[in-house]
Amino acid sequence: MALATDLAISVTGLTRRFGARVAVQSLDLSVPAGTVYGFLGPNGSGKTTAIRCMLGLLRADAGKVSIFGESDPVRRLDGVGAIIETPRFYAWLSGRANLEICEAYLPEHRHGQIDEALERVGLLSRAHDKVSGYSLGMQQRLGIARALLGRPRLLVLDEPTNGLDPQGMRDVRELIRRLAQEGMTVFISSHLLSEIQAVADTVGIVLKGRRVAEGRVSELLRASAGDSGAVEIELGGPDLNAIRREVATLDGVSVLPETDPTRVLVRSERLPASELNRALVSQGVALDALSVRAASLESLFLSLTESEEVQ
């Protein structure tokens, strides 16, 4: 476990209620300094509420939050840049003018970084255009530029790739990597699991306001995959239920939730792929394809979600 002095964010027992509904329940998070931390959970799981409590935008009913060892609600925000949900701007002003307004609220020694921030997000050439002419993706990038003003030690991004095309998503991913290499801590909330897996060192997964998993991505995936890894089975025929029924009879093999209706994804903890293939074929189940893939955050996330729903 990281020492408190090694943590960018430490959350202990965070709880937030809205009337009778508990949005965040006894949440514990440990975000190592200088890393990219992915904060994952389905819609309504309490992610944004938790972030708002961390940043003092909502008052928690219980629990403690410290950022770089500082627990005072005001002082702990020094050196923090953030986007919470959709960034908002003055549409009739230029991108640069919007950033100049925000820069005016920063200490004077942190001024003079607007061009640097705009260049980092690829908007320097459009700096003098009105925000009303920006696409949704451009506004998202302008929000990231605004969060980078003052060169924060901690950058909190809530769904930073919303509205971005594939090129824009790749640019943001590369930017996050560069910032982490420079020593910045980046805390990302996202539903795009493949994007998180591509950049995050550590993740925390929340369901119904509770943390259900936290750790280094490599360690969580290793534990999730088991000894044999996940086996992905793709069928050309229409009867996927036959696959599911037969897999359910095999020891150490389980069906994972999958969003693609043309395939069945199973996790085998004991049977190698070749033996699993023989077991299915011997029962008259024809396969178009069988391939072994590395465990992913998607399979881990869906497995945890399914387990929570069963409880």
Image (cartoon, rainbow, N blue to C red):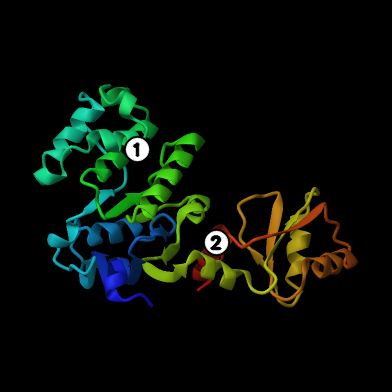
Quadrant including the N terminus: bottom left
Foreground: 277 or 5? 5
Asked whether residue 12 is in view, the answer is: no
For label 1, the crowd category at 10 Å Cα-Cα, with few meaning under 14, some 14 to 19 and many 20 or more, is some
Foreground: 47 or 79? 79
Task: Provide residue 8's location: percent of width, then percent of height.
Answer: 29, 64
- Give the numbered dot on residue 63: none
Mark 1 and mark 2 lie on one chain; the one further toward the N terminus is 1
Disc 1/disc 2 C-alpha distance (Å): 34 Å
Give the image quarter of residue 94: top left
Please name the residue that numbered disc 1 is placed on: 120
Task: Provide residue 73's location: percent of width, then percent of height.
Answer: 15, 63
For mark 1, give the secondary structure: helix
Above-or-below relation of 264 to 106: below
Give the image quarter of residue 96: top left
Please name the residue that numbered disc 2 is placed on: 302
Kind of residue at disc 1? Arg
For mark 2, give the secondary structure: helix
Task: Provide residue 166's location: percent of width, then percent of height.
Answer: 51, 37
Name the residue located 28 percent from the left edge and 69 percent from the top edge: 10
Foreground: 150 or 190? 150
Task: Provide residue 256's location: percent of width, then percent of height.
Answer: 63, 63
